[in-house]
Amino acid sequence: MEVDIITTPKGFHCKLCNIDMPNKPSLDEHVKGRKHKTLTDVRATRQAQEERSVFVSGFQKDASQTQLTEYFQRFGDVENVIFDKDKGVYAIVQFSEIEGQQTALSQLVHEINGQRLRVKPREKKGFKLINKKKTDFQNLQEVLERLKPVLVQAETVNEQMHCVVERIQLTENKKNARALLVQLIQEVFTEFFPDSQIMAFGSSVNTFGIHSCDLDLFLDLENTKTFQARAKSSTEPVAEASSDDGRSEDSILSDIDLSTASPADLLELVAAILKKCVPGVHKVQVVASARLPVVKFHYHQLDLQGDISINNRLAVRNTRYLQLCSGLDARLRPLVYTIRYWARQKQLAGNVGGAGPLLNNYALTLLVIFFLQNSDPPVLPTVDQLKAMACEEEECVIEGWDCTFPSQPIAVPPSKNEQDLCVLLAAFFSFYATFDFAGSVISLREGRALPVTSFIGQTREETTQEEEEEEAMEEEQPRQPHNQALKLGPLNLLDPFELSHNVAGNLSERSQLNFQRECQEAEKYCRSLQYLRKSTKGKPWGLVRLFTPHGEGPKHKNQDGSADKDMSISIPFRLALLPEGLRAQLQQAGDDFRPLWFQRVCVAVVQVFQNVLKCGPGSLTEPTPAGDPGHADAAPGSCVSMDATSEELNTSNDSGVAGQDSPRSTAAAAVGTKRPLSSESSDASTSPQGKKARLGRGPKPGAPCWTWSQTHAVWAGRRKVRRELVKETVDSRPEGSSTALETQVTEHILEKQPRVKVPLVFRVQAKLVGATQSTKVLLQIHPPSEGKDHFRDFFHFLEVFLPKMVDTLMETTM
Ligand code: UTP
């Protein structure tokens, strides 16, 4: 079967064209059809172009297309030069033959007018169909343009926030129109399914709706099932059985047994009724592959997109919970609207078509509520506290999950927190700017961050990052049964009721990093006068600047906050990718899992430099740079050269792995707990998550440091060597996924390529960052004083290669 086609419970789905097909004949027809053929051809052309192209950066801002064409022409015929949108940051140089690309890549140094260029293979991007219809994001963008002058005129940030709510919320008129539509659908469905009930949930009714939001409906067939069962068991003829409101069983109920029919069959039926019997409804489509299968439709008169599901009682209940939270504190709505808007602008939320690697609105709202549970004093109670305030009649269990909370806000004492919106908004950003996403599972039930290690053994089959991104781009995964384990990811946010569901399980690592980075940027901005004080000259201030779209604000810094020129590489904590044995050890370590993981990463880092890249020991001749962030916490003596660690190797064997060649012992010795503590995690006690979950309070590791030397350009032309080697062997895995292959590549380069003029002696310092930031190892690379330019290429190679290789080594050897 074609690679683009997947089977689904309801037939087939073409990933390339994003189309569902109910059966094999329609699949065959589709595959032979014009759309599929055209897209297949376009994709093939794009892929061929990618193969023949190089990615170039580092040129002067005013460099022209002709200049780049002229320069690259020497490697092969240049077909096209495409600049980035901002012009001057990067360019794609497209050769007419693949040889041109290879020759360009095999040259180590590239220069135009004395300016060093960086030339890399072009990143391969998956081909995706772009929806030409105006997106929700574009609509919002237009709203902001109209909103800007109004916000600039407001007197305070609080006023601005209320203004955002007023302008983008679902108006009463629209709410009423939606209610009428729900009534119409209800009437039609009652004809076919006596005693059935249609209930709206999600943004239409959860008090956070915006004017373009969709209409989520739940069709409750429980009473209809009872009605049908009663009719069946009755001695009366079926056609004479009647519902509570005196209706007769319709012929549809004679055809289908609701208690045994599959959800897919029921949805087909729902779709047929919608299509044929509800005036104004069109574009009806069953999406059976979603986490919760739905029937999608469009309602012409209101230009409204709707979804009907038949198994979503929990969503109706969590919608009630959001309504309750809004009723508990009037600050929640303006905060959620503002943060949703900000997240849209920064491209952190708003998956097209509901699925994708970004945050969904429900998840974002829960993040706001969790923050408010952790403010001091709390603005909102935890879900467990709410449960304790509910009376007996309010007890509610759905699908085995406890969903009890008071039905009215009056049952809950008001918060003692009096902070105004402006302060709370800034506090939201600082809360998540330093939040340890990788090491925590956010629990609104308990109102605290639980250590991720306590979920080991309860996690679902692990998937790689690539698989996760792909998964996220597909429709959401089918709903998990009650005892199903939690799917851990870069951001773990437990649903307040369905405790096996990670509401942010679709999020890619990149999205999580972007979210945190944007929070850091926003936090910084919120400390400035431009946030707090109205401009007397009518310039953008307060929320207007905060809403600057992604990519239009000041240049971003690296993940660790350092400026671009800093050489640091980060290796994030990704529990799902670790081998089972190590996961078990981390679980045993409890809250102290970080130092143990750090130690293992260091072992792998040493292996990469020593065994895979064949770096030799370097001597420590250069003093530690003053004020160097990498050294800020390291006391004299905490730096270990390779010579020194070799010595330690012979004497220290506390990890239980001995041997002259064992880099594991090397790093284990270097990460001794006697070393000075990193100041990085010392503020854990002030963070709500640190305060409650006591994360990262164990023995803190030091900052081991190694000095290496490299005599060959082991980074240059690796791809070509790998390709040649792969031809001879069966090992065809991608870069960084095979230790043996990468070691062979290095050996080949050492054997065949000349030495570099001056050996590159550089230092690598590892630091564990965590507790109040996402857990990761930060490797600060200190370049040699000689051959710095050469070294930059090595560094760029390491940036990509090292984290991949460390993952591979951790997976295979620990
Ligand atoms: P959305 O994320 O679509 O939120 O989830 P929304 O508030 O309706 O925002 P729009 O529609 O994008 O404007 C819709 C509803 O689906 C349920 C929740 O009830 C949520 O309000 N839901 C969503 C879950 O129960 N679990 C999830 O993981 C996601």
Image (tube, helix red, strand yellow):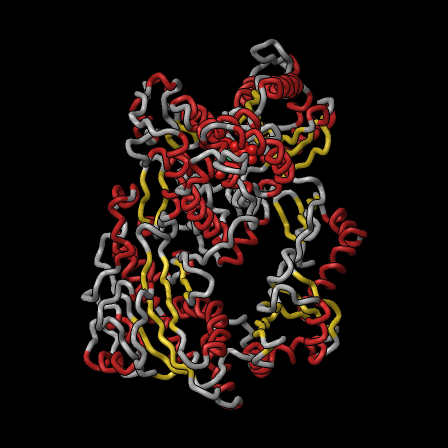
Residue 294 is left or right of residue 74, and the answer is left
Residue 187: where, in percent of width, then height? 64, 16
Residue 725: where, in percent of width, then height? 56, 82
Say which quarter of the image contains residue 23: top right
Residue 459: where, in percent of width, then height? 40, 50
User: 19 or 757: which is nearer to us?
Assistant: 757
User: 82 or 476: which is nearer to us?
Assistant: 82
Relative to 520, residue 598 above or below: below
Relative to 215, residue 712 above or below: below
Residue 559: where, in percent of width, then height? 43, 57
Say which quarter of the image contains residue 322: top left
Determine the residue positioned at 74% across, 26% down.
Answer: 276
Q: How many marks?
A: 0
Relative to 343, residue 759 above or below: below
In the picture, the quarter occupied by the N terminus is bottom right
User: 527 or 715: which is nearer to us?
Assistant: 527
Determine the residue positioned at 36% across, 45% down.
Answer: 441
User: Residue 483: in sight, yes or no?
Assistant: no
